Structure formats: structure tokens, C-alpha cells
Image: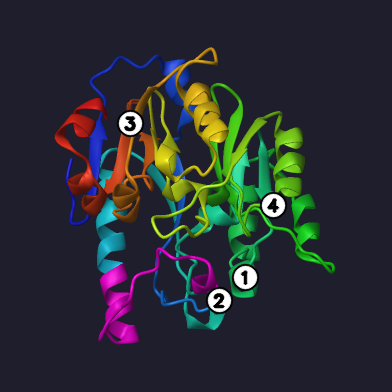
Amino acid sequence: GKSTNVEVIYSTTYVPQDVARAQSSNTCVMVAPNAFGSNAQAARDNHFMGSTGTMTAREVRESALAEFKGLYQGLRDIGVRVHLFAHDLKHNTPDAVFPNNWHTVRGGTLKLFPMKDENRRLERREDIIEYLLERNKGLKLDDSLLAHEHGDAPKFLEGTGSLVIDHVNALAYVAVSERAHIDVVKEYCASEILEPVTFVAKDAKGRVIYHTNVMMSVCSTVAIACLESIASDDDRRRVRDALTTSHAHTRELVDITLDQVNEFCGNVIEVRDGSGAPALALSRRAYDAFTPHQRAML
């Protein structure tokens, strides 16, 4: 499928419904980038932020909104249910378009996550939280991890930016960074009955990658990962084995390069369409950067 800026790939491999249901969702939360802009706080360790060149702040927002519209419509077209919210300048949340960094809904719990940058903590809006609790009767709120934001040595874990979860095998892949502290990872995984698979990943310039989900994604039958970004040989083997051989449900590995990470080939996500079939949502930039062989695997 195709929209203005989003591609949707359907797998030709049979996927059992229980696997698809466990790994991916037919429902998502989206926040329109009505007040999107460059975030100086986040730019300190997010080296994937691109320059806006000579574009004005208004032009940046209009461009972001046009791309967002394509993504939103592309997901709706295949039957994904979207809870859509807006934000404006008064919220002071230029990165609000990424709500997966501050919350997850898993196992009947709405869990909130400690965020590194102060203006990103403002994204945890009461109106969104109350809406999700109201629409999902029985959903419980867990904000226990937020205690890590305070104190002399604050620690962070930024949702499914930091965590790439293999729900089928109960694993959580985490590239440790300033935004993913090992102590918070262990606490989260213990509460969710997940086994942490931690490592350090670096970009082509040797800088620590700030979020795991820019270098890997786990889907129902395939996993996408940039193994060359993982600094340790032992960690690299451990991640490869966890993805492909050492657990009950194995996947075919699409090993991407650091250049492809820069084209956001790792920053993709599996969703389920209206019929329950898994589909991969990704930017056209990422789609074009995959090789023909990799696209066939996907």
C-alpha cells in the first residue's frame, strides 16, 4: 500500500493468528504535530535529528503535518484503529508526536515512563491518560517508574523508544544509553515478566545510539536489526541468537547497515490490519533504502 509518505508491506509468509495478536496491535495512539518543532533539549544526544535548513518554524510544522496526514490515512486505510490527539504551542511539547516514548499499554496496565528531557515529561498529559483509562475499562495506571526522574542521580527509560519488545518470547531488547538506564530496565522487565537483552549500540561516528528502535524492530516472522552497530562481539552474537535460534519462536533476520539506520530502516513497526493480518508500516525513505532482497524478506 502507499500514501504520501508511508509504505505498508504485507508478509507473504503465513503468520498464525495467535503470534500476530501477541506481537502487534490493531490500535494505536497518535498525536498530530500541530506544534512540532526542533527540540534543543533532545538534540543533545539525539544525533538523528536533521537540520531544517532555511525552513521557517511554520514551514517545518506544515511539512510535518503533511507527512503525518499521510501516515494517519495510510494506517486508517488498512483498518488500524487510531486514537488521535492534538497539541499546540501552549503545551511546550515539540516532540509530542512520539507518545510511545512516555507510555505503553500492555497486560491490562497503562505504564508511564521516566523521560530524560524536562519538556518531554510534559507530554504525559492528564487528558490523554484519562481518555485511555476511560475507553479501556479495567485498565490500571502504573506510574511507579516516574520516581526515577527525581533525586541526585535521575535514571530514565523512554518507553518503546528504549524498549523493543518480543512479546511472543517475552524478551526486551534495550540499547543502553542516557535514555535507558540498566536499573530501570531491570525493574521494568521484572514487573512485566520479560527477560532483558541489553547491549550498547553506536552509530557510524561512534556515538551511542539514544533509542533502540532506530536500529532494530521485532515483528511476527522477521526481525530487523543493525548488528554492526552493537559494540561488543559477545553482545552481537547474543542478540543474533535471541532473534533467530535460541527461543521457542524464531524469526528471519534482516541485518541492516549503519547507512540504512541513517535512512530509518530500523525505525519501522508492525501493526495488524482490520482482518488481523500483520503489516509493516515504514517511511518511504526507509522503504527505498532497503535492498530488493531485504524487501522480499519483509
| Quadrant for the N terminus in the image | top left
Give the residue type that dot 4 points to. Answer: His
Q: Position of residue 270 (x, y in %)?
A: 38, 36
Q: Are marks 4 and 1 in contact (CB under 8 Å)?
A: no
Q: Are marks 3 and 2 in contact (CB under 8 Å)?
A: no
| Quadrant for the C terminus in the image | top left
SS category of the residue bearing label 1: loop
Q: Which residue is mark 1?
A: 117
* Between marks 4 and 1 in the image, the one whose residue lies nearer the viewer: 4
Q: Which residue is mark 2?
A: 41
Mark linked to residue 254: 3
Looking at marks 4 and 2 on the same chain, the residue that comes earlier in the sequence is marked by: 2
Give the residue type that dot 3 points to. Answer: Val
* Between marks 3 and 1 in the image, the one whose residue lies nearer the viewer: 3
Looking at marks 4 and 1 on the same chain, the residue that comes earlier in the sequence is marked by: 1
Which residue shows up at 46% across the image and 19% down it?
A: 19
Tell me which segment is drawn in magenta: 42-64
- Between the residue at mark 3 and the residue at mark 1, the CA separation in whole angstroms equals 32 Å
User: Eyeballing the image, is 161 above or below 126?
Assistant: above
Q: Position of residue 108 (x, y in %)?
A: 66, 35
- Between the residue at mark 4 and the residue at mark 1, the CA separation in whole angstroms equals 14 Å
